[in-house]
Amino acid sequence: MARKLTGPVVIATHNPGKLKEMRELLAPYGVSTESAAELALPEPKETGETFGANARIKALAAARASGKPAFADDSGLVVDALGGEPGIHSARWAGPDKDFRGAMNRIQTLLIEHGATASEQRRAHFVAALCIAWPDGHVEEFEGRVDGIAVWPPRGDKGFGYDPLFRPDGFDRTFGQMDAEEKHGLPPQGQGLSHRARAFMKLAAACLSQP
């Protein structure tokens, strides 16, 4: 049986966009949060070879440094025609200045080089791996995925990262054109559309008390 999460939790991120989304997901459950950035915790090196491994590294580092349960996410965009890139290197492609427009331009350039111009050649998916870690080393892990295509040009200025590039299947707008409620609002009000929302629904069912 999964361990239940109670009391304050550290959100192990220094990314304001991710922090905002993760706080929005946790808020209905009455879980108080602090971020790794607010606690001035160092960012561990993400040396894992999967999204799950990197989420675990971040959650365990924050839990041990803070002495509190920690909640971490590792997520990214996987483009089929690029052999799965940028994948776990999604943030790295944007560089230290978080230049995601530059990273999206790089994806488009590579897709053109691969002859991927038609929609069916531009299949992509977002993956989110979530991990809750406790100071004693116990972890609970969950993963979500949403499929779609990499559009061009990027559309919308909502969300963060590669959201303007990604149009989920069944929709005519990108994540960058959706507000937070449409993108990852949880049932019954929302559809739990995003990769992060889908992973979070699994986490909530296992580790959180229903609101």
Image: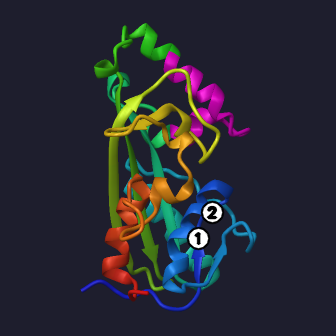
Confirm or deny contact between disc 2 and disc 1 (CB under 8 A): yes
Instruction: Please name the residue shown 55% across and 66% down the image.
Output: 22
Type of the residue with mark 1: Arg
Q: Name the residue under label 1.
A: 23
Residue 148 place in picture, x, y as percent? 35, 36
Residue 128 place in picture, x, y as percent? 41, 54
SS at mark 1? helix
Vertical position of residue 147 compared to residue 16: above or below: above
Type of the residue with mark 2: Lys
Instruction: Please name the residue shown 52% across and 82% down the image.
Output: 69
Vertical position of residue 211 compared to residue 73: above or below: below
Tell me where the magenta segment starts and ends, as one range. 90-108
Q: Quadrant of residue 170?
A: top left
Identify the image quadrant of the C terminus.
bottom left
107 is within the stretch colored magenta: yes
Residue density around tag 2, few if under 14, some if 14–19, many if 20 or more, within 10 Å: few
Q: Mark 2 points at which residue?
A: 20
Which SS type dominates the magenta stretch? Answer: helix
35 is within the stretch colored magenta: no
Q: Can residue 53 be seen in this view?
A: no
Q: Quadrant of residue 4?
A: bottom left
Q: Is residue 39 visible?
A: yes
Judged left or right of residue 161, residue 14 is right
